[in-house]
Image (spheres, grey):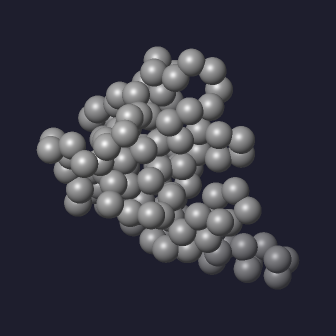
């Protein structure tokens, strides 16, 4: 009986946290989305950090159109929910996670992508 009683407050707390996270507005992000062995990551323009992509959502279809084979990198602008700092992703090596909600733009990756004049960095 005690196990059930303890589980109820924990479940309620997780439900409230999930509801709060869903109420946040997705961020507009520009950078590189990479898929490789045991990794789906996003590196924002102007940052040396890579973030775990916990849910590529609509980005996966665009990625498949642009990349031949299983692994590669594309240059994207997306709207995504981003977590606070922590240890997330494969083996907990990423400082944040992003869940893509909308693809604004996607193209093959190239040299100088983040230095282009039309790149927005928030």
Residue occupying image coordinates x 59% and y 39%: 35
Residue 28 or residue 46, whichever sits in front: 46
Q: Position of residue 22 (x, y in %)?
A: 39, 56
Q: Residue furthest left?
A: 117
Q: Position of residue 84 (x, y in %)?
A: 45, 71
Q: Is residue 74 visible?
A: yes
Residue occupying image coordinates x 51% and y 58%: 51
The count of marks equals 0
The image quadrant that residue 59 belongs to is top left
Residue 93 or residue 117, whichever sits in front: 117
Q: Residue furthest front?
A: 111
36 above or below 93? above
13 above or below 63? below
Residue occupying image coordinates x 29% and y 32%: 105
Which quarter of the rendered picture does the C terminus lie within? bottom left
Q: Position of residue 33 (x, y in %)?
A: 47, 42
Q: Is residue 12 visible?
A: no
Residue occupying image coordinates x 82% and y 82%: 2
Q: Position of residue 79 (x, y in %)?
A: 31, 46
Which quarter of the rendered picture does the N terminus lie within? bottom right
């Amino acid at each position: 009986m005690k196990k059930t009683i303890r589980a109820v407050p924990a479940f309620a707390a997780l439900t409230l946290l999930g509801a709060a996270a869903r109420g946040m507005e997705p961020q507009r992000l520009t950078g590189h989305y990479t898929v490789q062995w045991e990794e789906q990551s996003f590196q924002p323009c102007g940052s040396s950090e890579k973030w775990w992509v916990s849910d590529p959502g609509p980005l996966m279809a665009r990625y498949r159109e642009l990349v031949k084979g299983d692994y590669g990198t594309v240059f994207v602008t997306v709207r995504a929910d981003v977590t606070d700092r922590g240890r997330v992703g494969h083996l907990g090596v990423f400082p944040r996670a992003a869940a893509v909600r909308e693809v604004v733009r996607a193209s093959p990756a190239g040299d100088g992508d983040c230095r282009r004049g039309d790149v927005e960095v928030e």
